[in-house]
Image (spheres, rainbow, N blue to C red):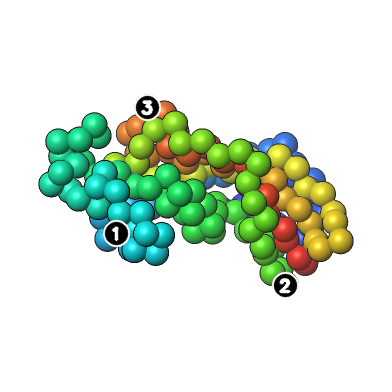
Amino acid sequence: MKQFNGADELIAAVGTHLGYSEWFEVTQEKVNLFAEATGDHQWIHVDPERAKEGPFGGTIAHGYLTLSLIPVLRQSAWRPGVLKMGINYGANKVRFPAPVPVGSKVRAGFDLVEVSEGAAGHQVIEKVTIEAEGGQKPVCIAETVTVLVY
């Protein structure tokens, strides 16, 4: 895991690959809990019997569930150092090129694109590529924006 000791070290790492997360299993229970939290109960996510006959041969994770895993995946890939707080500021781009079959494991790779200092803290832009174990294409590619306050 890559560990930074403050903003200066983070700024010096712009343009580099920060590493990969550990593998994370996407279970039907996690998908069902996400469906409950968001109200998205589409059968391709929550009905394993019906989904067997569907286009993916089983249930798949919600795209936004996959996106929401970025913070937990980041924790095992890199750390910014001691912070007062970190805030999700948004995403510049998000794509879901392939589905995440329930029961599969995913991991994320992180590339540091930009760090800029602002009034609220350091704005960090990273390219995050999430892949499913054994998959041919990424399951999520996102350019995320986080504000870190040291």
CB-based contact (under 8 Å), mark 3 and mark 1: no
Q: Residue at x 25, y 52 (%)?
A: 46
* Residue 127 position within the rendered picture, expressed as x and y whole percent measured from the top left: 62, 40
Q: Residue at x 81, y 63 (%)?
A: 120
Task: Give the CA separation, mark 1 to mark 2.
Answer: 33 Å
Task: Give the CA separation, mark 2 to mark 3.
Answer: 39 Å
In this orientation, which residue lies closer to the viewer: 136 or 141?
141
Spot the residue most to the bottom.
Answer: 84
Residue type (three-letter) at the residue carrying disc 2: Lys
- In the visual, does 117 lie left or right of 125? right
**Which residue is tagged 3?**
136
Q: Secondary structure at mark 2?
A: loop
- In the visual, does 57 lie left or right of 70? left
Instruction: Name the mark on residue 148.
Output: none
Q: Secondary structure at mark 3?
A: loop
* Residue 84 position within the rendered picture, expressed as x and y whole percent measured from the top left: 72, 72
Task: Give the CA separation, mark 3 to mark 1.
Answer: 26 Å
Q: Residue at x 24, y 31 (%)?
A: 55
Crowd around label 3: few <14 · some 14–19 · many ≥20 (10 Å): few
Compare marks 2 and 3 and give the one earlier in the sequence.
2
Residue type (three-letter) at the residue carrying disc 1: Asn
The label nearer to you, 3 versus 1, is 1
On screen, residue 60 above or below 97: below
- In the visual, does 73 lie left or right of 27? right
* Residue 142 position within the rendered picture, expressed as x and y whole percent measured from the top left: 57, 40
On screen, residue 84 above or below 71: below
Compare marks 3 and 1 and give the one earlier in the sequence.
1
* Residue 121 position within the rendered picture, expressed as x and y whole percent measured from the top left: 80, 61
**Which residue is tagged 2?**
84
**Which residue is tagged 1?**
32
Q: Quadrant of the C terminus?
A: bottom right
